[in-house]
Amino acid sequence: MHSSSTDPHSRASLPLAPSLDPTLADAHMPRQFRPLDWRVLWISFVAMLLGAAVSVVAKFLTALIGLITNLAFYGRWSYDFSSPAGNHLGLWVIVIPVMGGLIVGVMARWGSRAIRGHGIPEAMEQVLLNESRIPPRITWLKPVSSAIAIGTGGPFGAEGPIIATGGALGSLIAQLMHVTADERKTLLAAGAAAGMAAVFSAPISAVLLAIELLLFERRARSLIPVALGATVGTGFRYLLEGNAPMFPMPQVATPTLPAIAAYVVLGLIVGVISVGITRLTYAIEDHFEKLPIHWMWWPALGGIVVGVVGYFAPLTLGVGYSNISSVLSGQIGLGAMLALCLLKLLSWSIALGSGTSGGTLAPLFTIGSAIGGVLGITLASVAPWLQIDPHMAALVCMAAIFAGASRAFLTSVVFAFETTQQPHGLLPLLGACAAAYLISGLLMRNTIMTEKIVRRGVRVPSDYAADYLDQIFVRDACSRNVVSLRADDTVKTVRNWLASEGVATKHQGFPVLDTNGQLLGVVTRRQLYDAALADDAHVRSLVHRAPLVVREDHTLREAADHMVEWEVGRLVVVGKNAPHNMVGIITRGDLLAAHARRLREARHASRHLDLGMKPAAK
């Protein structure tokens, strides 16, 4: 018959049947988590090869952009990475971006619609919804379409398409290998990080970008391959391009305390601007959606604006990396910076909203640095006592605008440092980017990277916290007063007992013990109430497999994974040093109950110290 907590069968420790010994060391025991295994070596090796391949692709793409730029604006055959700003085409400069938009529209319609946009949101969507499986044709369609768009004057950076192409190449290689979805995601992120590192010579920020925008985690088994891929990508960059900083600028002095406070305020201002830019970009995209013509023609319409703006402000054409360096170096005057900021924003936001192919990083850095330069010069003039350096203000705002728009906070800080090699800028960068991140988070639900896919119904993680279940041991959450059934009890006897509705009958599963008090398995209420069962059937006949067990020193995460793997709702808990003795039961309800402390810590505010003086008792 049944037993309760006062019964011998429900004592704290029950032996398992000797015949089950082999199973306890096999699949019926969950595997304890290990942060690393030998397979990471293989994935890391592939990531390093991928980093080398992506760096070559990055070199090819920049050469292709240079070739198209030189052909379109100068009529010469050259692979040099040139700026379209020096052209002498006159009004014909308006036609070239339109032609580029037409070609991109055709490629998107009959090639793949996924090449539209700057690529990172599309890669995020594949990671979140499609197990990191990017269609192979994107591997060549994205770089070619981007080279055409940028080479014909599109106001985009080459880094976005290269990041997207690196991710697509990593996904393609992973799809040709026998790997898990997690490993495929790691290789996708490694390719993307290698692409960014190969363009900007910024390996650490490339790894951080992969963590903040693609991996949505920071685990050793994914971090190490991504870091090695970015390292190789940067090494090839040094080999092919040299190791000079991407955006050279004069050395800045250590900022004073008033200056640091001013830079933080600039971060707040730029944070508000970044929210406005994000909303403007998607508002323009929404208006394109309302046009009564096929979306294939939209990039050509955007190209008209790019061409017209480029006619009046040639510096807005193309990637504009040299513009960033000029602003940071103070080589552009106040009026020119203001015009560059406003006109680049107009050209880029309309072109991006039209659905052409290109990146967002370089335009945002251009706009942010110009804003910082304007604000820095203005404040240095009207409030010299703040001791603001306009070069530092430009650097700070360049990073802060990306931190606010994308919320890739750490990426923004480290990127500005790596691309300029200004160690004295780290503290102002940290404060300004944190301020921009704060304002962006308060004013805007999604980011420039996530808004598009959120509209498609994709849930994008924004906070990466340690797994709470991985911090609690089974011994701290399991039920130890185990109510068990005897193997020789009949089904009718047990049903009658369950019908009594005593406290001990409320469980959904019960261990089954033989005549020697050893555990045979576990049966559920559903099994006991099966209408096909005869009343005189014995409980032992309902035990069809050995009990699934978990040790006291396993974590709740390992227990939960074991339940999911075997599609059960409860596990038998065995002792750490006595693996053949049952000490309790862990259920899905126990896993949910463990979250009570997490919710309490997050939501319940209380005071634990009272420093006030209490009046003495009379």
Image (cartoon, grey):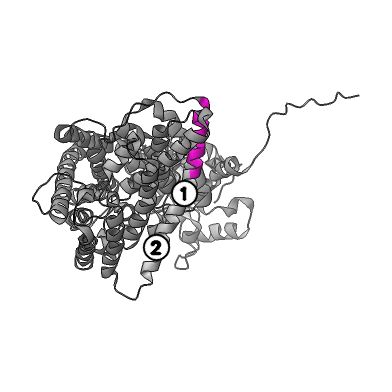
Q: How many marks do you count on the picture?
A: 2
Residue in front for this viewpoint, 351 or 601: 351
Magenta stretch, residue numbers: 257-269
Residue in front for this viewpoint, 126 or 75: 75
Specify the quadrant of the image occupied by residue 467. top left
Q: Residue at x 23, y 37 (%)?
A: 229
CA–CA distance in space, label 1 to label 2: 16 Å
Q: Position of residue 582 (x, y in %)?
A: 47, 39
Residue in front for this viewpoint, 354 or 84: 84
Give the amino acid type for the residue marked by disc 1 in the picture: Ile
Q: Residue at x 38, y 72 (%)?
A: 290
Check disc 1 and report the residue beneath it: 273
Judge whether residue 39 can be spotted in this image: no
Magenta stretch, main secondary structure class: helix
Secondary element at image label 1: helix
Q: Position of residue 223 (x, y in %)?
A: 31, 37
Check disc 2 and report the residue beneath it: 284
